[in-house]
């Protein structure tokens, strides 16, 4: 199936991978991967093709209701983990705990939290990485240039403001599928 993903990604869609293409190697078995800008449902299949093309196993979290029969089997098979989203729970700690259960766990999130234009990113991904003591790997969903640029691993420091400036700079000028939401 990897050859098919590569054919679709590179030949049919005309996309390319730039930057840290080795993020899938054994050295980084655990990380928080952030995808920006998240402007369209098209981001999902680009991400799925990217992970198959790069040969990397990634994970995501979803509300526990998504993991009921029959869809639960599929979502778990592609790396999904159920999350109890009832109020009063510390979701950052609950998600960070998922890193303890698997030898390999790369959690993919969209820091915008939705597909519309946002003024500020949500911070959960950052605190999940800090709590789990794993790096953040950034990748672009650049539809203008048809490329996914992948960063080197970035370990959050104790300077949240500077860390976010650094991450925002990585995405400067990147245009999503819907430019008005980028």
Image (cartoon, rainbow, N blue to C red):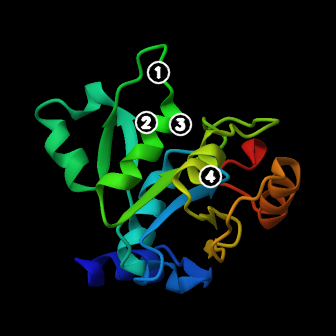
Residue 92, numbered circle: 3
What residue sits right under mark 4 in the picture? 130
Q: In the image shown, does 129 or 181 lie closer to the viewer?
A: 129
Taking 2 as reference, is 177 above or below it?
above
Which image quarter is the N terminus in?
Answer: bottom left
Q: Residues within 10 Å of mark 3 (few under 14, many from 20)?
A: some
Does dot 2 land on a helix, a strand or a loop? Answer: helix
Does dot 3 land on a helix, a strand or a loop? Answer: helix
Question: Percent x, y for residue 119?
Answer: 82, 36
What residue sits right under mark 1 in the picture? 89
Residue 42, numbered circle: none
Q: Are marks 3 and 4 in contact (CB under 8 Å)?
A: no
Report how far apart the C-alphas of labels 3 and 2 lie in the structure: 5 Å
Taking 4 as reference, is 67 above or below it?
above
What residue sits right under mark 2 in the picture? 94
Q: Is residue 172 visible?
A: no
Q: Is residue 91 visible?
A: yes
């Amino acid at each position: 199936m990897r050859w098919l993903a590569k054919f679709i990604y590179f030949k049919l869609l005309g996309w390319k991978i730039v930057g840290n293409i080795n993020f899938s190697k054994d050295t980084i078995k655990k990380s928080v991967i952030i995808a920006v800008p998240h402007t369209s449902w098209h981001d999902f299949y680009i991400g799925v093709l990217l992970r198959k093309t790069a040969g990397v196993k990634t994970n995501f979290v979803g509300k526990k209701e998504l993991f009921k029969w029959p869809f639960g089997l599929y979502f778990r098979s592609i790396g999904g983990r159920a999350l109890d989203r009832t109020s009063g729970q510390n979701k950052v700690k609950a998600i960070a705990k998922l890193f303890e259960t698997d030898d390999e766990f790369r959690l993919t999130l969209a820091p915008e939290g939705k597909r519309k234009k946002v003024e500020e990113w949500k911070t959960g991904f950052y605190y999940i990485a800090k709590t789990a003591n794993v790096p953040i790997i950034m990748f672009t969903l650049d539809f203008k240039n048809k490329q996914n640029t992948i960063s080197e691993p970035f370990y959050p420091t104790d300077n949240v403001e500077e860390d976010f400036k650094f991450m925002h700079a990585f995405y400067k000028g990147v245009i999503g599928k819907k430019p008005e939401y980028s």
